[in-house]
Image (tube, rainbow, N blue to C red):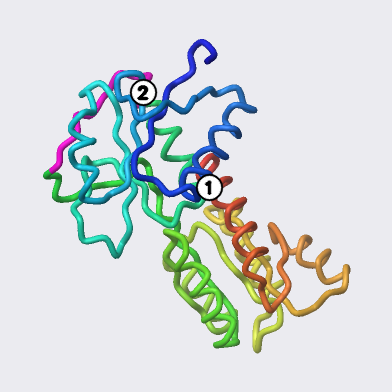
Amino acid sequence: MKPNSLGISFFGLTNKELAVFQRVIQFFEKKGKLFHECQTDTASAAIFIIKNQPDAVEQAKLVHTQQVLLTLVNNNNETPAMGKHVIQQPLLVTRVMRAIDEASKLVQSSHKTPISTSSPTPTAINESTFHALVVDDSAAIRKQLELELRETTMTADYAVCGEDALEKINSQQYDLVFLDIVMPGIDGYEVCKQLRKMPNYKRTPVIMLSGKTGPLDEVEGILAGASTYMLKPVKHKDFQETLERISKWLAHFS
């Protein structure tokens, strides 16, 4: 164990869930931020991560008041969450990174939170819910992206054409925009150009969506101000990897 390394203790996690946290710990280590996994020994852990399940209650009572308790919760779980700091499942890497980073700040600043097994309204640690706009004239593509976004904490609005998109963009702020290129009326390139002229949208990630595969199409999208480019139909793995990368950028720079 290296000096200044914070101990993390886990209780009740599956091997798959534990593997996500271990990946995040390894990533932090490469960046110079050190954590180490403890056995289920609360005395040597600064951060305690527990599955929200009935048999975890007694274990949670052992957590000292100077330790930070994170509870994994599921929308379908009827068991009240222990403590006020939660990590919402599914366990996206970016979500776990933000939660552990925020927990370490709580430890280091000595703003420790005693656990409470009767907290009625648990809130996530800096768990930002980004708001997306999906613009596509295809109902099938809009539905596909809706299903993909359900696996995240993001919310979304939907537009069926460029004019509809600009009306929504002018009326509220979005954190990111999925933008189809070929649409009736104003196409995606023109929407992106107009969006980039707005001071509050100069840095907003714009993901161009198109069935076109030519390199000139991608170049034209970049010239219009697109952040990245995805082919339709969107593949699940590609979509989630792109979304994870953009979410990480939003969490640190937005």
In magenta segment, residue 115: yes
Left or right, 132 with reference to 183: left
**Magenta stretch bounds:** 106-117
Percent position (x, y) of residue 208?
A: 68, 68
Q: The residue under label 1 is which amino acid type?
A: Val
Left or right, 162 with reference to 21: right
In this rendering, the answer to whether 12 lies above or below 77 is above
In this rendering, the answer to whether 243 lies above or below 249 is below
Q: Badge 2 local density, few (<14 within 10 Å), some, or many (20+)?
A: many
In this rendering, the answer to whether 233 lies above or below 195 is below
What residue is shown with label 2? 45
- Which residue is at the far left? 118
Q: Residue at x 55, y 41 (%)?
A: 253
Q: Residue at x 70, y 61 (%)?
A: 226
Using the image as rendered, state which of residue 184 and residue 179 is in the foreground: 179
Q: The residue under label 2 is which amino acid type?
A: Ala
Q: Residue at x 48, y 13 (%)?
A: 4
In magenta segment, residue 253: no
Using the image as rendered, state which of residue 204 and residue 38 is in the foreground: 38
Q: Are marks 2 and 1 in contact (CB under 8 Å)?
A: no
Percent position (x, y) of residue 237?
A: 65, 64
Disc 1 secondary structure class = helix
- Which residue is at the far right? 215
Label 2, label 1: how many angstroms apart (C-alpha)? 22 Å
Q: Answer with the quarter of the image where residue 219 lies.
A: bottom right
The numbered mark at residue 93 is 1
Percent position (x, y) of residue 10?
A: 38, 36
